Structure formats: structure tokens, C-alpha cells
Amino acid sequence: MAIEKIEGTPKVEWTPKVLIQLGIAIVLVLLSGLFGWLAFSNWRFKVNLVEGYQEYDRGRPPVAVKQPLEAALSWRPTHNGARELLAKVLCDEGALEAARKHYKMLEMQGYKVPQVAIGLGVLALKEVEPLNQPKQIEALVNEAAGYFKQAPGVPEAEIGIGHCDLVLARKLNNPAYYTRAGQTFKKIQTAMETPKFRAEITRDGLIDYYTGLGKALSSGGNQFDEAGRAAFLACYQYTPSWSLPMSNVLMLEARRFATMNETNDVLVKLSPDINALRNQARQIYNGIKIREEKESYRESWIMFSLALGQAWGRAGNLNELANITRDLTSANPDRWEPYLLDAQIKSELAIKDDPNPALQEQYVTKSTAAFNELLGKLPSDDANKERRARAYNDAAWTLAWRGGYLNNESLYQQAMQRQIEALRLFPEDYVFNRNMAIILKRFRKPPSNPAAYVDKCRAAVAKDKELAEDFDKLQKYIESK
């Protein structure tokens, strides 16, 4: 059976029902796209926000925190938590204008929690640093204190008040503010014992507390160094990757060891703690990536090592002194301070009254070698002119002593050459001329007449009568047979 062929094309009819169905379909497509975009943006916002919070909680570098937070705000600009943390991170890394902009946006959005006022207070204290005019400094610190007072009872605000006094003490060079800061931190220390205060304080608040407490205590002198050291070490426990707390510990330890005059047995008992501290400090140094931070930390490390070497040397342990100076010179070949320390300690040991001249001669010989090394390292600029002259004079003394002990005029000749170098730098110096006259007197046949140097001494006495007694002894010695 044949199928009939349909003639013509069917017509499309746009009935109201069809138009309604088509409109609904278009709306559903648009809504699905919109909801998909909202879901995607919400997902991206949460991913960036969580990443920023996690990086901050891990104590990662600010750049690792800042980028995800900025990305989170690009998805949701009105999120107060992300903007608050970003403002804090920017403030911590020194981007003060950007931080202030974000804090002001939070205020405009009606977000006026205590942390915003505290953040603005911290920002104001940081803005004080480049200033040097007392009135400007005081005005900005008062502004910071005003922000902190807007958050009464909040631990970080109370700590901020203490830091205001620390900034004034340092910038105005006024120790009275250290006393006031100490009183503030003492009150906080008492409040730290209450459960409410401990529950409310943040990790950053604890870091600021221990940092401020350490500064306040260490400003009081050596008797407070142990408490200050404990505070800085507590701060270090919270921020093991931050070099500043350990740098402060090293400087306090340097002050302690520089004035220490203990026996070798006492230092040996302290060795486990000393070595543990040195290992911790070295690990931090090796982990620092920023050049300026590394240079600053290196100064604290060098001062601590020098002071420790000084304590070992004064205890008579030259092996430990040699280990420390070797460590310093190998890591810092451009520094002359280790050579100065070595010469200082060995000369101190050499001039001690010792009933055994043979033992004393060993120390004097070591002093000669130490001064020779020091003179090879000291720069020849004007800043080190006096230091070089003293080194030449001290080297001459050690050579003259050995010349007398060994009855060796060759050593006298070397001593005279060293003294000539000292006088070349300071021709009118009383001590240098006096010592040259004595060295020449000890020759059987002096290469030159000591009278010229005695005359220089006489001229110096005319200007400074306190030298008269020593000059009388010099004259008697020169005139003796």
C-alpha cells in the first residue's frame, strides 16, 4: 500500500502555552547559572578564607597569609573577619597605610569590636618608629593609648598600654617610662593568674606580653636579667621561628657573661645549658631568610659569643676561648672583635702576679701572638686609629717583658719597632713616649737617646699634673745606673 506524500511544510504556532513554557525554561537556565555561580564563589571564598586562617595559625610568613585573605575578600568584600585579619597581617609586616585603610573600612561597615581599636593602637605605635621629634612622638603614643583605652578589660589592650610606655622610654631616652611600664606589666602578671584573663588572652597577646615584660625587666639592670631572660624565652616558645625573642635572650646573656668572673668549675657546670642555648640560637640563625633580619641577629650572636669567650678566658680555660674565637672567625672572617678578645684575655692572664715566671712567660708569649693577629685584622682607618696604637703599644710591652726575661736584645729591638708604630699614630702620647724611653734604657747600647722621649713626657706632665708621680718614677729609672 503506498503512503501518501504530505504536501507543504507544517506551521509553527506560538500559542500562549508554548510561550509560557519557553519563558519558564529560560528563567530556570538563568537561575541555575546564577545559583551555580553563587555556589562556586561561596566555595572559592571559603577555600581562600580557611587557607588564610590556617596559614596564620601555623605562623607562616605574612605573604602566605595575605594572598588567600585578599582572594577571599575579592569574593566577599564585606566579610569582617577576613578584613580584620588582613589588616593585622599588613600592620605586622609594616604596610601601615594599607592596614589603616582596612581598619577604617571595618569601622565604616559598622564593625567596631575591641580588636579594631587595639589594632589601630598597635598601628599608631608602629608609626612612631621613624619619628624623632618628642612632641610628635608623644602625640602619636597618646593616640595609641586612646585606642587601647577604648577596649577596657581586654588583655591585649592592657598589654598595649604597657608597650606605650616602653616606646616612650626608648624614643625619648627616659628611664622613668621603663619604671611605669614595669608597674603595668606587674599588674598584668597578677591578672594572668585569674582564669578569666587566661581564657581571653590570645597567642599574639601572650607574645606581646612576654616581649614587653622582658623589655621592662631587662631595663632595670643585671639584677633583673634572669627574669627578663625567662620572659623572652617564654616568648620564644610561642614563636620559635621569630628571631627577636632569642636575639634579646642572647643580648641579656652577653651582659651576664661579660661581667662574670667565675671559676672554670662553675662554668663547666653551666655548660649543658650554655650549649643548649647556643644550639637553639644557631638553628634560628640558619633558618633566617631575610638579609636585614639575619644581619641584626648575627650581631646579637657575636656579642653573646664574645662575652661567653671572655668568661671562659677569665676562668683560665683557653681551650674553650679558642673554640669560640675559631667559631667566630670562621663564620665571620671580616670581623676583628674575636682577635681583640683573644688579645685582651691573654694579656690579662699575662699581667697577673704569678710566682712561677716560666708560666707567666708562656702567657706573655701567647699575648704577643694574639696582638700580632689583631694588628693584622684591624682596619687602618681613623675610626680604629687609637685601637691600633694601643695594640702596637701592648705588643711592644709583651716583647719587652720577654726580652728582659730571656735577656734577649733582639726582642727589645722588636719591641722598639712596635713602639715606633704607636708613636707614629700618636707622637705626643705620654704612655707611648714613656714606654719607648724604658725600652731604650734596657739596651746595653741603646739605638737612640731616650732623653727625647723623656722630654715629650715632661711636656705632657705640664698639661696634666696627675702624671707627675709616674713621671718622677720614670726619671729615677732613666737616671739609674
Image (cartoon, helix red, strand yellow):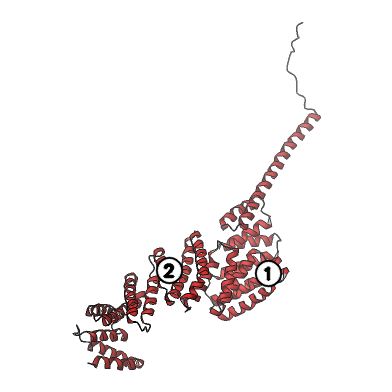
Question: Image check: 110 left or right of 380?
Answer: right
Q: Can the viewer see residue 221 in this picture?
A: no
Which secondary structure lies at badge 1?
Answer: helix
Instruction: Give the amino acid at mark 1.
Output: Pro
Image quadrant holding the C terminus, namely bottom left
Q: Quadrant of residue 365?
A: bottom left
Q: Are marks 2 and 1 in contact (CB under 8 Å)?
A: no
Residue kind at label 2, given as amino acid type: Ile
Circle 2 — which element? Answer: helix
Q: Residue at x 56, y 75 (%)?
A: 226
- Residue 177, image quadrant: bottom right
Q: Position of residue 176 (x, y in %)?
A: 58, 81
Where residue 448 sits in the image (x, y, percent)?
20, 84
| Residue 358 image position (x, y, % from top left) | 32, 79
From the viewer's perspective, is 321 left or right of 21?
left
- How far apart in space, not on screen, are marks 2 and 1 (Cα)? 43 Å
Residue in front for this viewpoint, 76 or 392: 392
Residue topped by disc 2:
324
**Where is 84 relative to 196, above or below?**
above
